């Protein structure tokens, strides 16, 4: 089964997987930025893309799963916003263009996946003065598809490990690098606490004399 088929199958297991609300860290980290061009990597069912578009961003949103993208397009239509949804396997192809915000929210996979390579490519797509926001898990959650029972061991990097691996050089400043708790509805419907990481980097703009 290809990665695309694996994600389509995962999405078909349920009518909707995610909450439909934007990720809290996206809202808190980005809410103050002036809107511009945004790229949402691994947009899933589109809640972040819809929220960004509703707040004035021109959004390109990408996912490997056509099933997820159809749901995301329905969400955008229902919300009355325009989002440019595109299907890419980011391990192979990446959307053209330069963006004031590139966001990767929980761009994880239960199978082998070169996440850092995609995130380095993501950094290359950030405009001067723009922001790269990466939200990730720090552990295996109780969900089967987060790498729990039966899945291979995944290393979830700390913010410092991720920043080192990205190796972006001194043209970037670190705005946020934290590990933090987050409340989430668990597989049984009860609220559980997850441990996540936030990395927010700004590409320095050239200074004018
Ligand atoms: C854990 S989900 C997160 C979805 C969404 N960002 C959110 O926070 O609700 C990971 C998403 O990444 C997508 N994805 C995984 N591997 C991908 C790849 N190689 N290229 C593009 N998208 C991918 C999956 O289809 C899935 O929608």
Image (cartoon, rainbow, N blue to C red):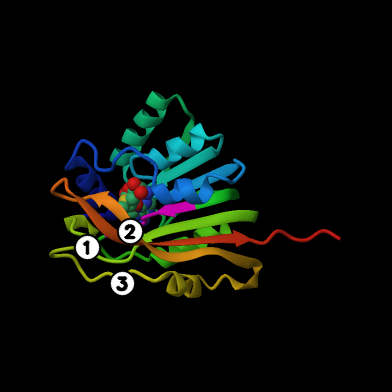
Q: How crowded is mark 1: few (under 14 residues within 10 Å), some or many (20 or more)?
A: some
Q: Is residue 107 magenta?
A: yes
Dot 1 or dot 2, earlier in sequence = 2
Q: Which residue corresponds to mark 2?
A: 108
Residue at x-position 18% and y-position 65%: 151
Tag 3 secondary structure: loop
Residue at x-position 36% and y-position 31%: 75
- In the rendered image of this protein, does residue 56 appear above or below residue 43? above
Tag 1 secondary structure: loop
Q: Where is residue 146 in the image (x, y as percent from the top left)?
A: 23, 58
Q: Which residue corresponds to mark 1?
A: 147
Image-based side of 183 in relation to 94, left or right: left
Residue at x-position 78% and y-position 61%: 207
Which disc number belongs to residue 155?
A: 3
**Count of marks, rendered view:** 3
Image-based side of 4 in relation to 36, left or right: left
Image quarter in which the N terminus is found: bottom left
| Residue at mark 2: C-beta within 8 A of ligand 1 | yes
């Amino acid at each position: 089964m290809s990665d695309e088929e694996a994600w389509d199958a995962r999405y078909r297991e349920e009518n909707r997987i995610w909450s439909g609300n934007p990720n809290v860290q996206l809202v808190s980290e980005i809410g103050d930025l002036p809107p511009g061009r945004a790229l949402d990597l691994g947009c899933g069912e589109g809640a972040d893309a819809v929220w960004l578009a509703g707040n004035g961003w021109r959004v390109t949103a990408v996912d490997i799963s056509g099933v997820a993208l159809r749901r995301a397009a329905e969400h955008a239509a229902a919300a009355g916003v325009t989002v440019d949804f595109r299907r890419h396997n980011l391990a192979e192809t990446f959307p053209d263009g330069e963006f004031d915000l590139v966001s990767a929210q929980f761009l994880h996979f239960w199978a082998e996946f070169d996440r850092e390579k995609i995130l380095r490519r993501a950094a290359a797509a950030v405009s001067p003065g723009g922001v790269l926001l990466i939200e990730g898990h720090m552990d295996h959650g109780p969900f089967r598809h987060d790498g729990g029972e039966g899945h291979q061991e995944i290393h979830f990097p700390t913010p410092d490990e991720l920043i080192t691996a990205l190796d972006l050089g001194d043209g970037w400043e670190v705005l946020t690098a934290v590990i933090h708790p987050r409340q989430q509805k668990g597989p049984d419907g009860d609220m559980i606490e997850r441990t996540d990481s936030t990395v927010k980097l700004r590409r320095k703009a050239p200074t004018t004399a």
